[in-house]
Image (cartoon, coloured by chain):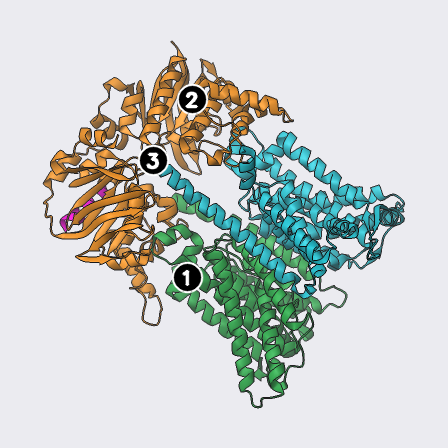
């Protein structure tokens, strides 16, 4: 009973209900939502946004918004590709990932240094570094679309699971990158919940001064978060290239806001300290469903943005009013006591 | 008198210095191409649209928030006006219908701004999220009403404003100048302007001081919406078309400009002239880079990013010194 | 018994400002020692020096007769020194377990989370003070007093020998303070030494064995509490003599007709409140934290919507839906929390003073006259004696007392008929407190009606003509001038 009560307090729970209701509606109207190919398709489109969602989650919980991950992804993927090409190591896909992670971490570390040293708002700093990374990518390197080295091509062609819908004849495949997503979530889950550094991420976001006094190294934790974000973004960037079967430098920018909206819908608190991986997945799933599946119930794609906008506004309004209401109720309770 | 000059704001002085230094460099290195009336005219036209939106974002940031939806308000207004003109140009004559379309577009912009303000004030959604949601919504509405395609076929009676010169100055730039002056006056000389600064500093204290925060916020976002609508209308005249996703990259640029112009990202401080000068500097810079065919225009992004971080650090250091001085003085 | 702590000749300066000019502090093992002084006297600096967060420029620190040439936070903890800060140093977003266990886990340099160990540590901690709390609850859902108990039990976990409590009673109700004092007494029995930092007279006398008073970064006196009197205490803190009671008698009283009357007023937080307020009268509203006193002041100022009852101003029944309506009726409120509700800290003194009078300083075209604004502000700075060199300075550069005068000046500028002050002298130096009280009495003698909402009984006695006592949202007592005394009020509020 207590568990149930706790459940209803979590915003993840409500997102889950909305997802269930929405999927039932779509299924009832079209009969296609729970079709194997649609499910695989939805999972497939969730892979990269869910990886980015980790960046957004970590930065929001510990510090504040990070909007630089799409461009870190773009630049680090590009640098990794040209490095492996130059070194002639394109046969191995692991090498590309390793290089990308190294480059991404360096860029993330740059964010971290500026944010930690000067305590500037992370939104503005990451906006600035995004602009810098974009300038380096498209200005200095004049990056253009590129074919992938052999290793990544093989990875892109391989699939974990291939399904075909018997009725419609439509097929879909689950790419290898899904494994990377799962691995990242498992690692992040373990780090956040079972290491002191992970608890430190929440502690720092909850109260910076208390964290300092308790003995957490606030600066190191924040620096670490942004560096890790760089590495995660880089992995997401390579995954994106693998799934599109080529590298498209201009396709990366612009995804950040939807990812942030997804994690906030999933219960991540804008003020910091609160946010779960469950919420990341649910929020991303909800927005992916809306973008992918509206067409199944005969709503024109033209309406897609309207729906996404409305969901973001309604979702955030509900949680904003809820927390405002909660603070009011609390003061009433205080009176009664 | 000296004290008065000092008061003008170290930030604006600094921006003006940067502007002058930059002009000198440009004169020396590109005397023929850069220092041409034509070049200045085209710069004036280009900066107008994102400049107007930056002013709007600036007001919102001073009030303690942010507006990520400007670009899409501009597009929605442009599309509304474009569609109205398209459909009425066949049946109406004269220019009355053009004026009507323009008015409706501005009203649309104002309404979008009021909607943002409502979400932020009455529903208490953090500004970043509220405008993040509303930009999707405005963009969605634009797509729906334009069927996802480019709105074109704008009557010449309207597009001529895109090429009109007033005393040698492009019409669009004149509009920009008027907006700068009006907004500067509103923000620095009126009661409303003062309230925006105070609400941005401490919304709770503002409420206790008798300021109607909700109304101040709604009006701030309405101003931003109207400025965006004007930007959308000017863009419609300049490029003879409107589309739901035009100028997506402007969103981040406007925020960069506003912070470069000295607005405090936490709210409460900043000035309209500062934003305007930042707009000019960035346009000069980007046009200057265009003079070098072998330098990609994307270098602009790099320079902007570096400039933003540098300005932040510079402000940080000078503020720290100032505070140390004040602490000693009192 | 020996000295658990002996610091000698501590000097510390920040950018040329001497915060500590050679402070000595000696605490005997097992005693409850009180450290008192006005804001800015160096209390918090010396705490930070003892706990290793600041390195002193000069001076020595000895704990249990062992010298610490360089004290670090972890060394201080190892030596048994624990500080309980005013904000309790907690993580509102995490569970009670984590809040209790973090310090020890981190001190042991453990890298991994063992949930069983966390729970064991937490259970051990709450047992130390028999603290009954849901260990899995999120701390943000708990009342203030529980948060403090979390901080105390956490401190005890680390084998604290000396617990430093920084203004521990600020956010507590009377009942909660009582419980805290019981815990302190228990701790003392178990041999724990307490350094109790406070400026509240009655608490200091009730709980402490000896007292050290600081002023301007220097020692003034250290003596057993039994040798201290209230007058001496005030004198040592401020360096000035005050006689508040006499002042009250001197002032000519001129209570006029009824200006405001409240009948059956109810709102979330209080119900069925009745009173009449006359011109020239100072009415006290007192009660514990959570008695509804703050809510009453908000309702009279249009910040809380009444659910029943009427407010009558000058014979006419009025509705007060918002602050500007209150302002138009001539009602002003100096709010409880100066820093968050009262002031625009980084903005200039001028803007802070003129904000509520902007409408009058604006021309018909909506243009604010800069000249009028500056004049208006200068007038009030002078009238109420705000000590500043430059009116353009941000308000945050002022001391607490001067900040409060700025808020007061803002509302006096609107020429109110009814002035409500909620906790007018919280966090204000005794000197400035005296100034503010004199000013209020002067305003009343000129015909202004004043409501002072305060839990500071001494303040109510010193200033008010009449007082109503609130408890649990209801008015439980009315005391007229002659009945106002420390005893009568204390018994009424408990």
Going by the image, does C164 lie left or right of B177? left
Going by the image, does C168 lie left or right of A27? left
Does label 3 or label 2 sit earlier along the sequence? 3
The residue positioned 34% from the left and 50% from the top of the image is C304
User: Which color has been applied to chain B in this rendered view?
Assistant: green
Residues shaded magenta:
C435-446
Q: Quadrant of the C terminus of chain C?
A: top left
Question: Picture coordinates of residue B226 (x, y %)?
Answer: 51, 70
Tell which subunit mark 1 falls on. Answer: B
Q: Which chain is orange?
A: C
User: Would you name the residue on which mark 2 appears?
Assistant: C163
User: Would you name the residue on which mark 3 appears?
Assistant: C39
Give the number of the mark in front: 1 or 2.
Answer: 1
Frontmost residue, B38 versus A21: A21
**Distance between the Cα atoms at labels 1 and 2?**
49 Å
Q: Is residue A110 visible?
A: no
Above or below: residue B163 compared with residue B113? below
Question: Picture coordinates of residue B220 (x, y %)?
Answer: 46, 63
**Distance between the Cα atoms at labels 3 and 1?**
38 Å
User: Would you name the residue on which mark 1 appears?
Assistant: B215
Above or below: residue C359 compared with residue C106? below
Frontmost residue, C32 versus C371: C32
Q: Is residue C440 magenta?
A: yes
Q: Quadrant of the N terminus of chain C?
A: top left
Tell which subunit mark 3 falls on. Answer: C
Frontmost residue, C271 versus C56: C271
Q: Pointer 2: residues within 10 angstroms few (<14), some, or many (20+)?
A: many
């Amino acid at each position: 009973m207590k568990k149930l009560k706790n459940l209803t307090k979590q915003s993840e729970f409500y997102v889950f209900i909305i997802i269930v209701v929405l999927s039932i509606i779509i299924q009832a109207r079209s009969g296609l939502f729970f079709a194997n190919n649609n499910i695989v398709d939805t999972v497939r489109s969730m892979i990269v946004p869910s990886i980015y969602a980790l960046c957004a989650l970590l930065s929001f919980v510990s510090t504040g918004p990070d909007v630089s991950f799409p461009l870190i992804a773009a630049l680090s993927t590009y640098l990794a590709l040209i490095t492996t090409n130059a070194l002639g190591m394109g046969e191995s896909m692991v090498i590309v990932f390793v290089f990308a992670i190294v480059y991404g971490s360096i860029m993330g570390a740059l964010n971290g240094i500026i944010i930690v040293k000067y305590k500037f708002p992370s939104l503005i700093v990451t906006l600035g570094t995004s602009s810098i990374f974009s300038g380096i990518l498209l200005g200095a390197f004049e990056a253009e679309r590129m074919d992938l080295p052999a290793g990544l091509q093989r990875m892109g062609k391989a699939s974990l699971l291939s399904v075909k819908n018997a009725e419609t004849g439509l097929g879909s495949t689950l790419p290898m990158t899904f494994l990377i997503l799962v691995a990242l979530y498992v690692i992040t889950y373990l780090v956040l919940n079972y290491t002191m550094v992970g608890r430190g991420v929440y502690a720092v976001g909850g109260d910076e001064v208390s964290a300092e006094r308790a003995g957490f190294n606030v600066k190191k934790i924040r620096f670490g978060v942004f560096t890790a974000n760089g590495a995660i973004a880089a992995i997401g960037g390579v995954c994106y290239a693998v799934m599109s079967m080529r590298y498209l430098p201009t396709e990366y920018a612009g995804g950040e806001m939807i990812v942030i909206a997804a994690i906030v819908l999933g219960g991540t608190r804008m003020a910091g300290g609160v946010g779960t991986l469950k919420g990341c997945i649910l929020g991303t799933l909800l927005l992916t469903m809306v973008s992918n599946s509206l067409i199944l119930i005969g709503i024109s794609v033209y309406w897609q943005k309207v729906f996404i906008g409305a969901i973001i506004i309604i979702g955030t309004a509900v949680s904003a009013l809820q927390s405002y209401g909660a603070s009011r109720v609390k003061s009433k309770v205080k009176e009664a006591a | 008198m000296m004290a008065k000059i000092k008061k003008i704001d170290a930030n604006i002085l600094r921006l003006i210095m940067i502007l002058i230094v930059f002009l000198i460099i440009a004169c020396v290195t590109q005397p023929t191409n850069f220092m041409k009336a034509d070049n200045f005219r085209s710069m004036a036209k280009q900066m107008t649209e994102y400049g107007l939106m930056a002013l709007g974002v600036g007001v919102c940031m001073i009030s303690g928030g942010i507006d990520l939806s400007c670009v899409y308000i501009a597009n929605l207004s442009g599309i509304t006006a474009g569609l109205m003109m398209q459909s009425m140009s066949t049946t109406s004559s004269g220019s009355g219908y053009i004026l009507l379309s323009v008015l409706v577009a501005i009203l649309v912009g104002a309404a979008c701004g009021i909607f943002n303000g409502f979400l932020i004030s009455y529903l208490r959604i953090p500004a970043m999220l509220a405008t993040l949601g509303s930009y999707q919504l405005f963009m969605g509405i634009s797509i729906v009403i334009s069927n996802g395609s480019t709105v074109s076929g704008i009557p010449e009676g309207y597009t001529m404003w895109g090429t009109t010169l007033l005393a040698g100055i492009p019409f669009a730039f004149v509009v920009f100048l008027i907006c700068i002056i009006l907004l500067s006056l509103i923000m620095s000389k009126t009661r409303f302007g003062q309230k925006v600064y105070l609400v941005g500093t401490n919304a709770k204290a503002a409420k206790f001081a008798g300021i109607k925060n909700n109304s101040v916020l709604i009006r701030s976002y309405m101003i931003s919406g109207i400025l965006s609508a004007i930007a959308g209308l000017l863009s419609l005249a300049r490029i003879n078309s409107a589309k739901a996703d035009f100028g997506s990259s402007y969103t981040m640029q406007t925020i960069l400009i506003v912070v470069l112009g000295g607005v405090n990202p936490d709210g409460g401080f900043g000035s309209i002239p500062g934003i305007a000068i930042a707009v000019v500097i960035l346009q000069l810079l980007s046009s200057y880079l265009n003079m070098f065919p072998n330098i990609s225009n994307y270098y602009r992004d790099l320079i902007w990013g570096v400039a933003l971080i540098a300005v932040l650090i510079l402000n940080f250091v000078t503020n720290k010194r100032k505070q140390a001085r004040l602490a000693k003085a009192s | 018994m020996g000295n658990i702590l002996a610091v000698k000749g501590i000097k510390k300066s920040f950018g040329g400002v001497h915060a500590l000019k050679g402070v000595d502090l000696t605490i005997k093992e097992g005693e409850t020692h009180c450290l008192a002084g006005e804001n800015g006297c160096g209390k918090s600096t010396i705490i930070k020096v003892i706990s290793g967060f600041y390195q002193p420029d000069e001076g020595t620190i000895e704990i249990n007769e062992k010298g610490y040439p360089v004290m670090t936070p972890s060394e201080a903890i190892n030596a048994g020194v624990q500080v309980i800060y005013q904000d309790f140093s907690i993580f509102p977003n995490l569970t009670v377990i984590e809040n209790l266990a973090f310090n020890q886990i981190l001190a042991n340099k453990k890298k991994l989370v063992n949930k069983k160990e966390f729970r064991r540590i937490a259970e051990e901690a709450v047992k130390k003070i028999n603290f009954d709390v849901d260990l899995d609850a999120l701390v943000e859902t708990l009342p203030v007093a529980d948060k403090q108990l979390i901080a105390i039990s956490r401190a005890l976990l680390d084998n604290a020998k000396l617990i430093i409590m920084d203004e521990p009673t600020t956010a507590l109700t009377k009942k909660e303070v009582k419980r805290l004092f019981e815990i302190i007494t228990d701790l003392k029995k178990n041999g724990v030494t307490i350094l109790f930092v406070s400026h509240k007279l009655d608490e200091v006398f009730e709980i402490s064995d000896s007292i050290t008073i600081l002023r301007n970064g220097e020692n003034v006196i250290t003596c057993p509490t039994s040798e201290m009197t209230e007058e001496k205490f005030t004198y040592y803190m401020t360096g000035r003599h005050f006689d508040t009671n006499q002042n009250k008698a001197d002032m000519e009283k001129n209570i006029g007709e009824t200006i405001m009357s409240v009948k059956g007023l109810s709102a979330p937080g209080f119900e069925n409140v009745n009173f009449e307020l006359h011109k020239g009268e100072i009415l006290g509203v007192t009660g514990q934290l959570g008695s509804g006193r703050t809510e009453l002041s908000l309702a009279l100022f249009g910040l809380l919507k009444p659910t029943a009852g009427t407010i009558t101003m000058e014979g006419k029944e009025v509705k007060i839906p918002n602050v500007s309506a209150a302002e138009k009726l001539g009602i002003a409120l100096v709010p409880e929390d100066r820093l968050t509700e009262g002031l625009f800290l980084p903005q200039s003194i001028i803007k802070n003073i003129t904000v509520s009078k902007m409408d009058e300083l604006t021309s018909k075209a909506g243009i604010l006259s800069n000249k009028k604004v500056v004049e208006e502000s200068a007038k009030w700075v002078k009238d109420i004696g705000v000590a500043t060199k430059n009116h353009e300075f941000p308000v945050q550069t002022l001391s607490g007392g001067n900040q409060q005068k700025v808020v007061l000046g803002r509302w006096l500028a609107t020429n109110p008929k009814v002035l409500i002050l909620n906790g007018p002298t919280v966090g204000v130096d005794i000197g400035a407190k005296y100034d503010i009280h004199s000013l209020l009495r002067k305003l009343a003698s000129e015909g202004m009606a004043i409501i002072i909402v305060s839990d500071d009984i001494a303040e109510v006695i010193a200033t008010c003509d009449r007082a109503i006592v609130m408890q649990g949202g209801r008015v439980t007592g009315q005391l007229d001038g002659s009945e106002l005394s420390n005893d009568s009020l204390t018994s009424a509020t408990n």
